[in-house]
């Protein structure tokens, strides 16, 4: 099941995935139970929210079926929202590697799905995302979510948390893309 912050029909679409001035970016916070997604438009100077939500999978399904459904839904969101590029949080674990394995599989399935749709995926560590959004790689979750709220002009923090985290991945990609463009002079 895929929950959305706004109906898809209210989001503007274009016939081409890429535009000259504005870039539509999909952010993903991968997870086996809940995968957050968020779409922002960025012109290199500022980002504005388009839509966000969470893809949920039932624990009664096998891991294989859950991963397949997540990847298929991510592909559907990318098509419906006409995204040009994707920023995704990379795997992070401290001690329990067995809990990281299903998330790594979700990341791989999403990368494959988006690649078949011609959408490049950029992976970012949690520290890189925190630095891009807050200016501090050691920021806590609440600080990141508050900056997402401020950057995107929300009245309150986007919910659920996985959707807010996905929006932070999209903002991170927008920041990196803008910085790289300035460095290369394009």
Image (tube, rainbow, N blue to C red):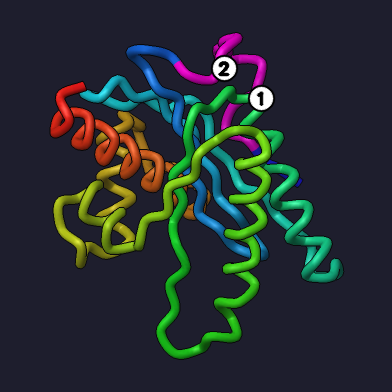
Find residue 103 and name its label.
none
| 2 vs 1, front mark | 1
Badge 2 or badge 1: first in the primary sequence: 2
Asked if the residues shown at circle 2 and circle 1 are in contact, with their CB atoms under 8 angstroms apart, the answer is yes
Magenta residues?
4-18
Q: Residues within 10 Å of mark 2 (few under 14, many from 20)?
A: few
Residue for point 62% across, 41% down: 114
The residue pinned by badge 1 equals: 80
Furthest-top residue in this view: 15
165 sits left or right of 151 in the view: right
The secondary structure that dominates the magenta segment is: loop
Pick whichever, 161 or 23, lies toward us. Answer: 23
123 sits left or right of 115 in the view: left
At which x and y percent is residue 74? 65, 43
Residue for point 54% across, 44% down: 37
Secondary structure beneath disc 2?
Answer: loop
């Amino acid at each position: 099941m895929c929950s959305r912050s706004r109906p898809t029909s209210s989001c503007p679409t274009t016939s081409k995935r890429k535009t000259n001035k504005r870039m539509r970016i999909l952010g993903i916070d991968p997870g086996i139970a809940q995968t957050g997604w968020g779409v922002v438009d960025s012109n290199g100077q500022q980002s504005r929210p388009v839509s966000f939500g969470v893809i949920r999978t039932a624990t009664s399904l096998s891991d294989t079926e859950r991963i397949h459904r997540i990847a298929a839904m991510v592909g559907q969101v990318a098509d419906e929202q006409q995204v040009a590029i994707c920023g995704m949080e990379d795997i992070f674990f401290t001690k329990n590697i067995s809990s990281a394995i299903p998330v790594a599989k979700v990341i791989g399935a999403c990368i494959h799905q988006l690649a078949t749709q011609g959408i490049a995926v950029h992976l970012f560590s949690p520290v890189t995302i925190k630095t891009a959004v807050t200016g501090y790689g050691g920021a806590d979750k609440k600080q990141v979510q508050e900056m997402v709220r401020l950057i995107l002009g929300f009245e309150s923090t986007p919910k659920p948390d996985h959707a807010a985290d996905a929006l932070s991945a999209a903002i991170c990609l927008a920041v990196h893309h803008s910085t790289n463009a300035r460095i290369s002079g394009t």
